[in-house]
Amino acid sequence: MILNFSLQNFGPVGEEQVLTFEADKSDHLEDHYVIQAGGYRVLKLGLIYGANASGKTTILKALHFLRKLVLEPEDKKTGELEFTPFLFDEESQKQPARLSIDFIHNEVRYDYAVEFNSSAIVSERLDFYAPKKANVFKRKTDLEHQFTEITFGSKIKTNAALRKALESNTLWNNTVLGGFLKINAKLHELSEAVAWFEEYLMPMVYTKTELDDFVTARIKEGSIDKATVVSILKKADFNVSDILFEDKELPIPDGLIDFLESQMKELSSGTAKTLREKGKITSVDVELQHTVGGAQFRLPFEMESEGTKRYYGFAGLLALLLKDEHIILIDELESSLHPDLYLHFILSFLINAEKSQLLATTHYRELLDNRDIFRNDAIWFTNKSEAGATELYSLADFDTSVVRDTSNVLNAYKSGRLRAVPNLGDYYIELN
């Protein structure tokens, strides 16, 4: 589970901004919002509000970037890291970006931090608590010679062969965790940290992300339970009584494999060879069975409404969050969802999830009108400073002069007392 995440000099974020999932002292909605993990009280949910272009999506993108930095290491030294530093300050453009995350995996806390520029990882470190804080490794990069130096903490048992293999496979633009993925070696603390990124931190869901293929594939392989997805869709008033699949084999179009090899690093030569020999790909047709007036009707997935398609994906994500431990990042959670369905999704997650987390950006303000469904420390805002930089802060940061337990938070937000709203001009437009 994520405890804290911080970012600095990343996109519109200049100075360090920190998002925390550590619950404050309030016991409001404790049973549904707070999880006990590793001796900490951890929140399940974080919702980020803010005006357009205020940087709220950047918080999610930075987490997604960190995941890729660890799990998808570059193959060549010449590969550049795809990010932009804070551009509204000349000094920031010359400085490295910094991401750090504190997380709990198997009841042990890990603190991981990495500094980087577009060409290389500048520095990196991993600490853990067993039970006191101890260092796993520190890494520095000789930028002039493009060389990585790794030192291990006194509590970490390694040998010369492992250290040499790890340094050899940790290119100057790779993380040590990414380098560890490339070698056949055992080191418990590194294995645990990598496993957290692989198993817990899920890829980001954008507003245009089509989730149906992801959900369908995982239902078919068994990692998402179909009956749970059907149940979620039923409770959301979609009259869905079953999900039906039909596999079809189609010929591979000329040039498709060459294109995939050029675009996808994860497509291995063995997979490409198998596809060429087979000459066909398997396509899955999906139909949703609706029960209406006691009769059953099958409707091809592509004929369903955009809201139904979106919620099929969300139902799959929810089933995944309930079955296993994950955090899912969703941009503009309310997209294509009726407000009642939006609330139904959040409440279904909070009531049923045991060890998972959800972090989402949203413009749905009406949630702030009901203190029976939100905690102050789960609500976050992004605001653009006069320097054009993103400021991240929580509703819990405001003292009682701004927000009291009896205050109407929605009205406070709409009136601008919490900031994080657009500063709009008048409606008149002069035409030349």
Image: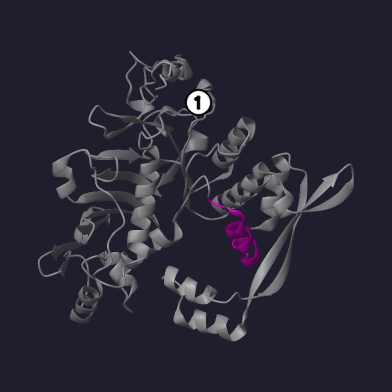
Left/right placement of residue 289 relative to residue 386 reads right
**Range covered by the magenta-colored residues:** 209-224
Relative image position of residue 391 (x, y in whole percent): 29, 32
The residue that appears at 68% across and 66% down in the rendered structure is: 284
Residue 38 visible in the displayed image = no
Circle 1 packing at 10 Å, graded few (<14), some (14-19), many (20+), is: few
Quadrant of the rendering where the C terminus is positioned: top left
- State which quadrant residue 415 falls in: top left
The residue that appears at 58% across and 43% down in the rendered structure is: 352
Q: Amino acid at mark 1?
A: Arg
Relative image position of residue 389 (x, y in whole percent): 26, 34
State yes or no: residue 328 in magenta. Answer: no
Q: Nearer the viewer, residue 302 or 8?
A: 302
Q: Residue furthest left?
A: 144
State yes or no: residue 210 in magenta. Answer: yes
Q: Nearer the viewer, residue 194 or 148?
A: 148
Relative image position of residue 201 (x, y in whole percent): 43, 54
The residue that appears at 68% across and 45% down in the rendered structure is: 308
Q: Residue furthest bottom?
A: 277
Mark 1 = which residue? Answer: 365
Q: How many marks?
A: 1
Residue 149 visible in the displayed image = yes
- State which quadrant residue 388 falls in: top left
Q: Secondary structure at mark 1?
A: helix
